[in-house]
Image (spheres, coloured by chain):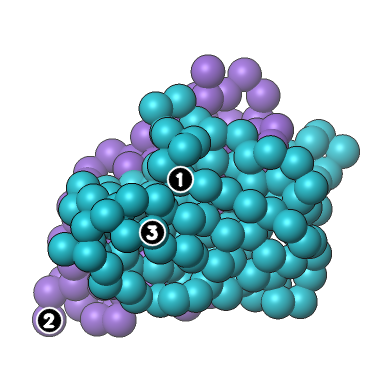
Amino acid sequence: GAVVSQHPSRVICKSGTSVKIECRSLDFQATTMFWYRQFPKQSLMLMATSNEGSKATYEQGVEKDKFLINHASLTLSTLTVTSAHPEDSSFYICSAPSGTSVRGSYNEQFFGPGTRLTVL
Amino acid sequence: AQSVTQLGSHVSVSEGALVLLRCNYSSSVPPYLFWYVQYPNQGLQLLLKYTTGATLVKGINGFEAEFKKSETSFHLTKPSAHMSDAAEYFCAVSLGNQFYFGTGTSLTVIP
């Protein structure tokens, strides 16, 4: 199957700094990527949909100025957590869907390995 | 509205026993259905999926699931649990351009 990578896998930063997380589709092109946040022992919470060449679509309650998303190419989306605070500490996962069917639903999503962010 | 319900946030089974993880969905049209497994500090790995065709789907690591439209269910089973099956399991549906995840079930395998 297709491979999605994330970098870094783990980052520790001081409060007030910004952190950039990269999500790459290694062997396929992804016009759309999704960014999720996962708290311990909980499910994935969709934060935003990253669209190549256009603005990201944010879910309700997610601050777009806090979580900056850039999808500059068909294989790379980045999530920047600006002015990070301890409450931003979490596990961030990106994914890229495969092609759609005639019903318009994605056949599958390929997930990155995740990035563990710890803000001190 | 679409939703995915996983009954039982924690399931414990003995090694060698049957594994049954439950998933029900609500949707006005049959969605695509998925089961993912997540090991600690890792991303999600696809176990199996149902899109069309045969309603009994076989996946990796000996898991299988059956799509039952009349029950709006997609329960995950494995005949004999192995210690390495201990992980978090997520049921998901794909409808339109959105994926909807269940809340997850943590599987513990007792030696």
The numbered dot on residue A18 is 3
Q: Nearer the viewer, mark 3 or mark 1?
A: 3
Question: Which chain is mark 3 on?
Answer: A
The numbered dot on residue A67 is 1
Position in image of residue A43 (x %, y %): 34, 47
Residue density around tag 3, few if under 14, some if 14–19, many if 20 or more, within 10 Å = some
Residue under label 2: B111
Residue A56 falls in image quadrant = top right
Query: Which of the image's four quarters has the C terminus of chain B?
Result: bottom left
Question: Which chain is mark 2 on?
Answer: B
Q: Residue sitting at 61 percent across and 34 percent down?
A: A57
Residue B16 falls in image quadrant = bottom left
Name the colour assigned to chain A in the rendering.
Answer: cyan
Q: Residue sitting at 32 percent across and 60 percent down?
A: A17
- In the rendered image, residues at marks 2 and 1 fall on the same chain: no
Position in image of residue B94 (x %, y %): 62, 40
- In the rendered image, residues at marks 3 and 1 fall on the same chain: yes
Q: Amino acid at mark 3?
A: Ser
Q: Is residue A66 left or right of residue A23?
A: left
Report if residue A20 is visible in the image.
Answer: yes
On screen, B85 above or below B28?
A: below
Disc 2/disc 1 C-alpha distance (Å): 43 Å
